[in-house]
Image (spheres, helix red, strand yellow):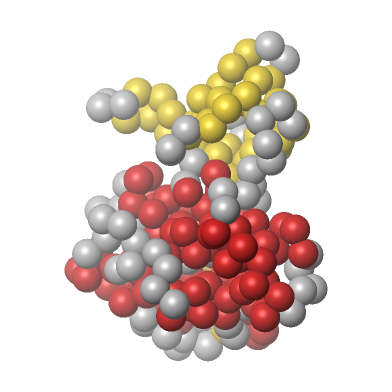
Amino acid sequence: MIGRLRGMLVETGEADLLIDVGGVGYVVVCGARTLGRLPAPGEDVTLMIESQWSQENGPRLYGFLGKDERRAFITLIAIQGVGPKAALAVLDVLPPGDLAAAAAREDKAAVARANGVGPKLAQRIVTELKGKSLGEVSFTPSGLPSAPVVAATPSMAGEAVSALLGLGMAEINARRAVDQAITRLGEDAEVSAVIKAALQELGR
């Protein structure tokens, strides 16, 4: 089973990418958030991989830039009614830390913003995720964060995305622009600077 791929990014599509590893090309399915954070084609990239097999699609590789995202994906697809497509859609709108926080406060509306996830499935997701670990963040059944406490507070990226949503931006586009802005400015950038840079990204 493949757990990680490191090689040259050949090209990206709307929902997948092609990575060359030692002369072998692997097609890897990724969410929009991951695709928006990739380097340019021709550069090296490392992906955490989750291998899945289905009778309908056969073997497929799902790629993530971090182990927390991969762990959250595995946790999501273990929930009844949540397939790989829905799991990627959830992680497009809620990175692992934000997803854990949404589950802790039973915010099914936040989960339901994911494409193809209705209110009933969103309720099931937040119910099932309570008390489970999503990377570095986990929440007890009571809804209180176990560790670290700061992970339950809105992230800098989350604040920037919320600001863009308030301006009428589509959520996927807003998150992609914010991720690109943070990559360019660094994790310590001020929220206002990230918002400004994200708007510039959206204007390109």
Please provide percent x and percent y for residue 31. Answer: 47, 47
Asked if 192 appears above or below 94 in the picture, the reply is: below
Q: Residue at x 60, y 58 (%)?
A: 201
Residue 155 position (above or below residue 40)? below
Where residue 117 appears, x then y in whole percent?
Answer: 27, 60
- Residue 145 seen in render: yes
Question: How many marks on residues?
Answer: 0
Quarter containing the N terminus: top right
User: For this view, does 43 lie left or right of residue 117?
Assistant: right
Between 48 and 166, the one lying in front of the other is 166
Place of residue 129 in the rendered image (x, y in percent of width and height, measured from the top left): 42, 69
Residue 166: image quadrant is bottom left
**Which residue is pictured at 75% across the width and 58% down the height?**
184
Closest to the observer, 138 or 172: 172
In this view, 177 is above or below 43: below
Extreme residue in the front direction:
203
Residue 142 position, x and y percent, is: 45, 88
| Residue with the most extreme top position | 23
Query: Which quadrant holds residue 133?
Result: bottom right
Residue 129 visible (yes or no): no
Residue name at image x 34 percent, y 62 percent: 114
- What residue do we see at 33% from left, 67% from top? 113
